[in-house]
Amino acid sequence: MKALTEKIVHYLVLLTVTFAAIWVMWKVSSRNHDSETVESTPVREMSPVVASKAMVEIEPLQVQMCEIFSTYSGKIRAWETYQIGFETPGRVRSLGENSKGEPLDEGDHVTQGQVLAVLDERVYRAQKNEAAARVEQTSADVQRAERVRLTNPSALSESELQRLATEEALARAQLDVAVKNLEDATLLAPADATISKRMVKSGESVTAHQIVFELVQNDEVLLVVDVPESQIRELETRMRLVEGNTTGADSKDDPDGHAFRAHVRLEGRDRFGNARPPLLGEVYHIAEVSDPITGLFEVEIRLSNDERLLRPGMVATADLVTARIPGYRVPEEAVIYRERRAYLFTVESEPAELELLYWDAGPMDLYRARQVDLRQWVDQGSHVVVPGEDIEIDSVVVRGHFRLADDQVVRVMNLPKPSPGQVHAANPREGVDGSVDR
């Protein structure tokens, strides 16, 4: 009896499992049939306004006068350097005085004609007096001889009168030399300058032409940079353009096109780590021949130094403006370089209909990325100059552009927000780029 019961239970379990398997197979078959029915039903495409978009940031652009420059480094030199000394030997009696009434020393500013030093002139003054007395004596001898010859021509020969006249001329020449020596005993400043070196002290003896002072003119200074011969032609062309009467493109549209400008940056920083304020200079001279050792051409840039803060020997970097053209200043990070070509992306808007479920919310702005190939460009470090005649754009993508494709729908993250009166009343959840927050 027990064995029969076990068989019945066993058969019941097998029947239950069989019916469960059949039911599962029927349900799977029903689902596949339903999915085929759904797939055969046409699906409405999603509007591009609400589709997923690449997020980008743009920067507005406009045509402006752009400077194209070449960068070089060099050292500042004094405008002029003077090494002066006495024409005559002697002992230095005293030095000139500065604005504080102290003897002149290095760093003092002097004006043209100011007394720098004075020799002991007693000997020269005595020589002048002696020469003046000899002139008076010889002049009196000539006058007496002329009177005698008028009264008695035979009393004085012509040769004797000529001898007296010659002695008078020699005496006057000696007087001129004595006056010159006395004047040379006082050393005067040849120009407004600053004392860079003083080689003597009061009481020391000096020889003729010994250097006593070294002066530098520093109201204006020169930044001298070395330019390779491959680029000197471009600088010379610009120099001739601004010096001559040639009418160039930038001379008509650019009021500053008549000058060969240079933007100068001093090397080093202040105590807070800030860069020195930039300086504006002008190319003054281009060397005719290159340096025989380096093979480079020296280009001199004139800088104003009214406060005399620029010192000879300072190192600076100059951006020489070789051309000024109307174009776009494109940020360096916005330009993509691929296989020897350069391009960028701009954003264009187009109208699109926004539909929510079965309701039409009206036209919205849809933004698409457009690829713009650059035919000509000049890399200027922090930005790229693109001629305005090559392209016409009003914005450029500066972030999120490395994975963009042409005609791709984008979401602009930094568009200006509309004023409260400009918000679309029918769709208050509209984003700044025409998309809907969901």
Image (tube, rainbow, N blue to C red):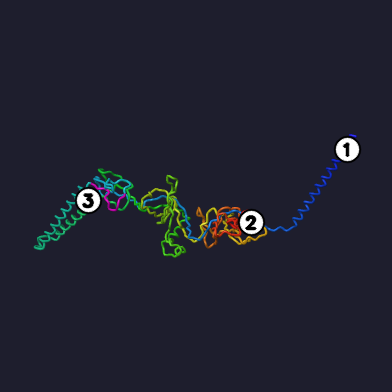
Q: According to the image, label 3 marks what residue?
A: 182
Mark carried by residue 7: 1
Which residue is at the front of the view, 380 or 84? 380
Measure how far apart labels 3 and 2 are at the Cα level: 98 Å
- Give the position of the N terminus as an image quadrant: top right
Q: Position of residue 138 (x, y in %)?
A: 15, 56
Classed neighbour count for the residue bearing mark 1: other residues with Cα under 10 Å, few (<14), some (14–19), many (≥20) = few
Q: Position of residue 29 (x, y in %)?
A: 80, 50
Classed neighbour count for the residue bearing mark 2: other residues with Cα under 10 Å, few (<14), some (14–19), many (≥20) = some
Q: Which residues are magenta?
A: 109-119
Q: Earlier in the sequence, mark 3 or mark 1?
A: 1
Q: According to the image, label 2 marks what residue?
A: 50
Q: Earlier in the sequence, mark 3 or mark 2?
A: 2
Which residue is at the front of the view, 362 or 164? 362
Per the image, label 3 sits on a secondary structure element best described as helix
Residue 315 seen: yes
Q: Position of residue 314 (x, y in %)?
A: 40, 48
Residue 248 forms part of the magenta stretch: no
Amino acid of disc 3: Leu
Magenta highlight: main SS: strand
